[in-house]
């Protein structure tokens, strides 16, 4: 039996940052991974998605100059774009694996199964450790309906060599809306079927409405309040049927109804680790019900956004905890979230939904920066920000609708997290013209002047 100081189960962002740090600082570390090293985001998630999205985003932004001097027809060659994606993304896990091994981390390929609180089995090997960190993430949900063998998940989609003529998405969450606009820009006919009455509930609903209108104008068909009942194959096509009698004919169906914690096969019961439907239960130090077994990333049962930066933050926290550099509870900063649609929607801090019953304690300002700064926004008149200030005039929440929303929300997250004032912002001379300086100039009058 091999003995380690720390064994990490899973090699994604929830784990590998801590693994590298601990190994470099003298701990004996192992990583167990049943799939590709570096996990979902790196191999078949965020990285692949944003690479493919880049082409659609360029086409989308170019349309703002139609009739205003920009000529030429841009279009997406999907096989060529996918080949570029594979050439760029596919080698990353091999490079990271080499880096992990170079610092001395031992890697075991296979599924980890707990034998007891101090040991796991991987294939025929038995490993033990002083501490374990479970960072196995989530896996795509699969609808329990007739014909679900015809459903595909996001990983399969992100490796499609050819786009079908028609594509249907089940669910109207982040994945569906992002992918739907991407493939529509590439020429595919798109439909979305959603059980709920709306989309993206956690985001500014005014901006979600603007986005849905944009999608409908693009020709994307969206069906709300529809429960998918079955999928059939008939005459070389798929037919998606709902409880109300709706039938959607398509060539490809992507199940984007959510993700579930990836805990099957871990044999958590043998170790006495508590878990729920939403994931592994942890305390404010990310400890499970077994004090020397921790969890990190999307596999945790939590309410905060399950995002790559959140997982990285947790991983870095656990490294400091196990090294004795920190004994405090984990305290999350404000977390910025982005939907990479065309245009983007971003959110950070408090939302209008959060303060629904106490709006008298806050100041809400809508900043139509797109209309007032068209020369800075590449002719994007619909771009807008909604900012929430508390009684002390500190920024405490923001949502942004626009092509540069990801960059703007990062700046706004820093203003919120550091409690910056007008005087603080005046100490920086920012690049002009830019959307950042434009939005900051427009929000400054509402911001606290000094601490």
Image: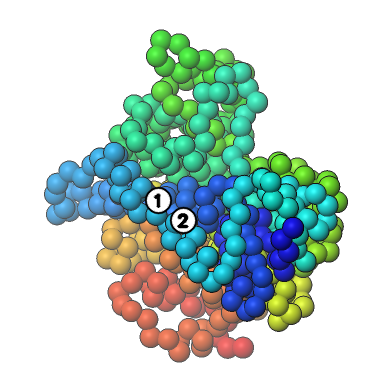
Q: Secondary structure at mark 2?
A: helix
Q: Position of residue 422 (x, y in %)?
A: 51, 84
Task: Judge by depth and name the residue closer to the eye, 47 or 188.
Answer: 47
Which color scheme did the rendering employ for the protein?
A: rainbow
Q: Quadrant of the C terminus?
A: bottom right
Q: Please give the name of the residue rendered at 57% of the width and 15% of the height, measured from the top-left corner.
A: 245
**What is the total number of numbered labels drawn onto the structure image?**
2
Indicate whether 298 appears above or below 267. Answer: below
> Answer yes or no: do the residues labelled 2 and 1 have beta carbons within 8 Å?
yes
Task: Judge by depth and name the residue closer to the eye, 135 or 433.
Answer: 135
Q: Please give the name of the residue rendered at 28% of the width and 58% of the height, measured from the top-left corner.
A: 379
Indicate whether 51 appears above or below 321. Answer: above
**Mark 2 Cα-neighbour bin, 10 Å: few <14, some 14–19, many ≥20:** some
* 79 lies left or right of 391: left
Residue hosting label 1: 90
Q: Please give the name of the residue rendered at 38% of the width and 42% of the height, measured from the top-left corner.
A: 182
Q: Quadrant of residue 356?
A: bottom right
Q: Please give the name of the residue rendered at 52% of the width and 36% of the height, measured from the top-left corner.
A: 153
* 109 lies left or right of 154: right
């Amino acid at each position: 039996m091999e003995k380690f100081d720390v064994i990490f189960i899973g090699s994604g962002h929830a784990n590998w940052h801590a693994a590298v740090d601990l190994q470099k600082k003298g701990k004996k570390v192992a990583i167990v991974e049943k799939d590709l090293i570096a996990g979902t985001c790196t191999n078949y998630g965020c990285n692949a998605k944003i690479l493919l999205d880049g082409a659609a985003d360029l086409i989308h932004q170019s349309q703002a100059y139609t009739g205003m001097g920009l000529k030429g027809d841009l279009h997406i060659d999907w096989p060529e774009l996918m080949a570029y994606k594979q050439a760029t993304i596919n080698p990353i896990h091999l490079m990271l694996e080499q880096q992990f091994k170079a610092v001395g981390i031992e890697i075991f390929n296979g599924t980890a199964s707990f034998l007891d609180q101090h040991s796991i089995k991987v294939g025929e090997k038995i490993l033990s450790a002083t501490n374990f960190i479970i960072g196995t993430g989530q896996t795509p949900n699969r609808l329990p309906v007739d014909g679900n063998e015809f459903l595909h998940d996001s990983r399969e989609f992100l490796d499609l060599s050819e786009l079908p003529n028609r594509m249907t998405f089940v669910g109207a969450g982040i994945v569906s809306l992002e992918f739907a606009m991407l493939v529509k820009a590439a020429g595919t006919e798109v439909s979305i079927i959603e059980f709920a009455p709306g989309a993206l509930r956690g985001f500014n609903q005014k901006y979600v409405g603007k986005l849905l209108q944009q999608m409908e104008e693009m020709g994307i068909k969206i069906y709300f309040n529809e429960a998918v009942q079955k999928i059939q194959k008939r005459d070389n096509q798929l037919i998606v049927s709902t409880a109300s009698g709706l039938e959607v004919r398509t060539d490809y169906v992507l199940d984007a109804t959510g993700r579930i914690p990836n805990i099957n096969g871990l044999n958590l019961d043998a170790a006495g680790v508590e878990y729920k439907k939403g994931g592994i239960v942890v305390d404010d130090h990310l400890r499970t019900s077994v004090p020397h077994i921790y969890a990190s990333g999307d596999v945790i049962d939590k309410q905060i956004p399950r995002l790559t930066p959140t997982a990285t933050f947790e991983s870095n926290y656990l490294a400091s905890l196990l090294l004795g550099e920190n004994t405090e509870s984990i305290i999350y900063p404000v977390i910025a979230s982005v939907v990479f649609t065309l245009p983007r929607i971003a959110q950070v801090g408090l939302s209008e939904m959060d303060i629904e019953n106490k709006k008298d304690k806050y100041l809400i300002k809508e900043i139509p920066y797109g209309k007032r700064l068209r020369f800075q926004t590449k002719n994007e008149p619909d771009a807008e920000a909604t900012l929430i200030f508390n009684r002390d005039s500190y920024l405490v929440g923001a949502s942004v609708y626009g092509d540069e929303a990801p960059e703007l929300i990062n700046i706004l997250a820093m203003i919120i997290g550091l409690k910056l004032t007008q005087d603080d912002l005046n100490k920086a001379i920012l690049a002009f013209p830019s959307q950042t300086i434009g939005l900051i100039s427009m929000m400054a009058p509402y911001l606290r002047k000094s601490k």
